[in-house]
Amino acid sequence: MEELLSAGRVAAELAAGHLAGIDAAPVWRPVSDADRAWLTGQRLPTTGRPLAQLLADVRDRVLPYPMGNGHPRFFGWVNSAPSPAGVLVAPLAAALNPSCAGGEHAGALLEHSVLRWLAELVGYPHRPGGGLLTSGASMATIAALAAARGRAARRDGWDVRADGLAGQAPMTVYVGAEGHSCLQKAAELLGLGRRGVRTVPGDDRLRMDPAALRRMMTEDIAAGLRPMCVAASAGTVGTGAVDPLDEIADVAAEFDTWFHVDGAYGALGVLAVPEPYAGMDRADSLALDPHKWLGVPVDCGCVLVREPSALRDTFSLVPAYLRDDAAGDLGWFAEYGPEQTRPLRALRVWATLSHLGRDGVVDLVGQTVARTRELADLLAAAPDFELLAPVVTAIAAFRHRPAGVTDEAELDAVNRAVPAAVQRRGLVFLTGARVAGRESLRACLLNPATTTADLAILLDEIRAAARGLTP
Ligand SMILES: *Cc1c(COP(=O)(O)O)cnc(C)c1O
């Protein structure tokens, strides 16, 4: 262990040095040909090497090529800078290396506190057993929709775990037009088929339209379909919009249907802008990703459920007679979701929240939302930019309209090409999206280190990249 001790000190310095020097380095850089060959062409070594030598390779070949998140001018997708507290404890979780399938050890026990904390932060009701940490929101959504499917079947007098779906009325799940693709993935996996995913049109703010939802559900039932879940978004990835959750909860209740909220990216926004989130606490299940806005190092998602038995009844293979529910026996986490061996994610969440405190999280969310509003103001004031949707949380969707380009198809082409061109320049990382059928640029601000000056650089870099594209 001498070797681990001395190499461990070097690794800690490398990690801290990487994070400390991030502002000065390019946000992202293309991988050199030599390093690409090295990274992709590794041969399985016959004999091993000392730890210190491995670190030299990590320093020279891996750390120079980050994805970009971590940098204050990373505006891409929904990827945050890692919280220092999360980075700090990640090696300790690896050293302990438990499986949090369950059992009597610190990792599994700490998860109970962390789940309660997350629920408390976003104002969601929590009872012991009412949730699970997952690899991400995709897995959280699979767990939630599986619980919804099981409940719908039970209410119709059959058991989907025993009998599968054959011979039953086709089930449907209602997803907003801007809903995340993980909902479709989950529906496909759960045997609903793509036809079981019903896309509900949005209003002029790209939020799910509750009246359209009610109409679709009524028609579907008349046509012999079986609605099993309404899945709303608390923060869409395209524009950061929050669906009218309260009204959607009313519709779900009218039809006695499971109400799921995808708050993977946006649930924490409730701490800065509570109004649009009214009704989130009425969800039967809520997906949220600590590895997004909160900055818990990847991976860490979470599913919370109103009724603790919903997940356990869906996934547990422990016979009911072996459970001692009356004694408050919560069983193993592996009974609440698809994963058996589970990493110790709770320590990274615990450390991040312990370091920030509730006040720190409120600051983090408030600052990034305020910075995004600043960006919206800059875009509105610039004649060569157009905001595509109101800024509600920490995402701005917009288009660049270079002077002289007026043709919509040409504008689509420019905006589609801009993100990669901006990335290559190395000062800013930006990605695009299709918003309401149009090619859009999209900036997501999750890093409190992003400054007003960084926003100006973002706009200038888009202009410069576009100039390089238009003849
Ligand atoms: C990121 C995201 C997902 C998918 O979550 P993963 O953690 O990537 O599995 C789902 N929905 C929304 C709104 C997201 O932002």
Image (cartoon, grey):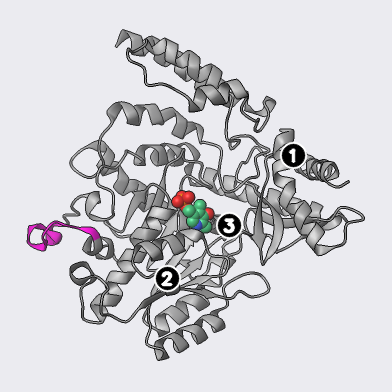
Q: Secondary structure at mark 3?
A: loop
Q: Are marks 1 and 2 in contact (CB under 8 Å)?
A: no
Which residue is pictured at 63% across the width and 45% down the height?
76
Residue 428 on image: x %, y %: 71, 38
Residue 344 on image: x %, y %: 32, 38
Asked whether mark 3 lies closer than 8 Å to ligand 1, one says: yes
Which residue is pictured at 65% across the width and 40% down the height?
74
Judge whether residue 267 can be spotted in this image. no
Q: Which residue is mark 1?
A: 454
Hey, what amino acid is under mark 1? Answer: Asp
Label at residue 282: 2
Check the image and report above or below for 389 versus 136. below
Q: Which residue is mark 3?
A: 237
Label at residue 13: none
Residue 358 on image: x %, y %: 49, 47
Q: Earlier in the sequence, mark 3 or mark 1?
A: 3
Residue 318 covered by magenta stretch? yes
Image quarter in which the N terminus is found: top left
Hey, what amino acid is under mark 2? Answer: Arg
Q: Nearer the viewer, mark 3 or mark 2?
A: 3
Which residue is pictured at 52% across the width and 65% down the height?
233
Residue 315 on image: x %, y %: 23, 59
Residue range (magenta): 315-327
